[in-house]
Image (cartoon, helix red, strand yellow):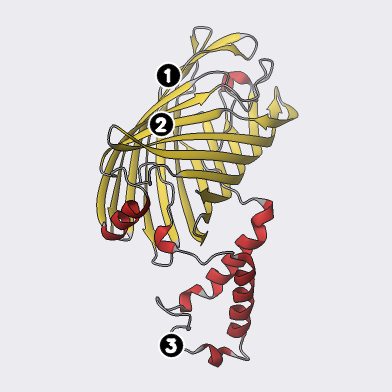
Amino acid sequence: MSVIPAVADTAARNLSQLAIATLWHWAFCWPYYSSDTFRFRGMPVRDWRGKRGASYFTVSILWLLIAWSTPPLFAQEVEIRRWNHLPINANFVTVNFAHTEGDIAVDPTLRLENVTVELDTWLLGYIHAFELLNKTARIELRQAWQSGTWEGLVNDTPRTVGRDGASDTFARFSLNLVGAPPLAGKAYATYRATTKVETNIGAALSVQLPTGEYFEETLVNLGTNRFTFSPQAGVYQRLHNWSFEATAIARFYTDNTSFFGGKRREQDPLYAVDGSVEYSFQSGLWVSAGAGINVGGQSTVDGIERDDRRGSYGWAVRGGFPIMRSLSFRAGYLDTDHWAKVGIASQTVSVGLLGRW
């Protein structure tokens, strides 16, 4: 059993004051800004003296002056989506944290009941965009460290299992086939500023490598001890401040020849479709909502088919804002459930930082 949250986002501890300062400022003061001045909309700053609003404004401005080393250049901010337009020769790093709690429904033949999990995930990711065949391409690497506790009944006996270690490594290559011309520097900035409607179509291959912690003698593992190949196809549509993204994924699994008890486990392909809608404000703040489903994935152990075909769904909300030109903050919530016999009903809260150079 391998549990890796679909969403994992965190802020580094040494930047927590910066994130808190920015959150305070945007939560209490952003709605009153005009688009082109530091006056409060319809009310000079001097009229706020002696009021609670003056305290919010003063404290937030002081925090931001201390925390921000450079003024934000919102027009040059770039957020990472699966198929959106990235500048070539650019590098991105994500540092993330996620906390997941869930109830797991497992194959009845395993004699496990009332299984629950609490899992913390620290995720480090790297993305590099480049030109290939006169198209914009990117490579991505993700590695997580996880710490979790699983509780449940094994043959009607309460048991608790803890795991701490590395999960499987993910690598992904993608290519924008339509749209997203390979641009950098001023050419990229000009194109982004003048293009309000665009359509990108892309294809990708993601590979899950069997690098995570794995023990043959236990069912609870952070790694999967097999390769997973996931071809993907997707479309990204931008309409001014709105953007829409949809992706179809098929996951193909190699056999796990060291499954629990020294058995051989095979698994049918798992098919997934997901989509999201996002709105970006002129200030750089953005919010999004998405949903997706997974079906298939029935397994066979030593030639015997299991009654564990997957059927699950999930929804998520996310948001973020730029802290400075090369750094932004993100947060999200993910909820999953299932209609099949086997699956996980979980809730995940995540926060993270995205840096660019």
What residue sits 59% from the left and 28% below the top?
A: 2
Q: Quadrant of residue 275?
A: top left
For this orientation, the residue located farthest to the front is: 186
Cα distance between the residues tagged 1 and 3: 62 Å
Q: Is residue 219 above or below residue 319?
A: above
Amino acid type for the residue under numbered disc 2: Phe
What residue sits 46% from the left and 26% below the top?
A: 207
For mark 1, what is the residue?
A: 268
* Earlier-in-chain disc, 1 versus 3: 3
For mark 2, what is the residue?
A: 173
Cα distance between the residues tagged 1 and 2: 23 Å
- State the image coordinates of residue 307 (x, y, percent, origin top left): 48, 20
What residue sits 31% from the left and 42% below the top?
A: 182
For mark 3, what is the residue?
A: 42
What residue sits 30% from the left and 57% below the top?
A: 190
Amino acid type for the residue under numbered disc 3: Gly
- Which type of secondary structure does the marked residue at label 2 adopt? strand
- Which type of secondary structure does the marked residue at label 1 adopt? loop
Q: Is residue 183 above or below residue 297?
A: below
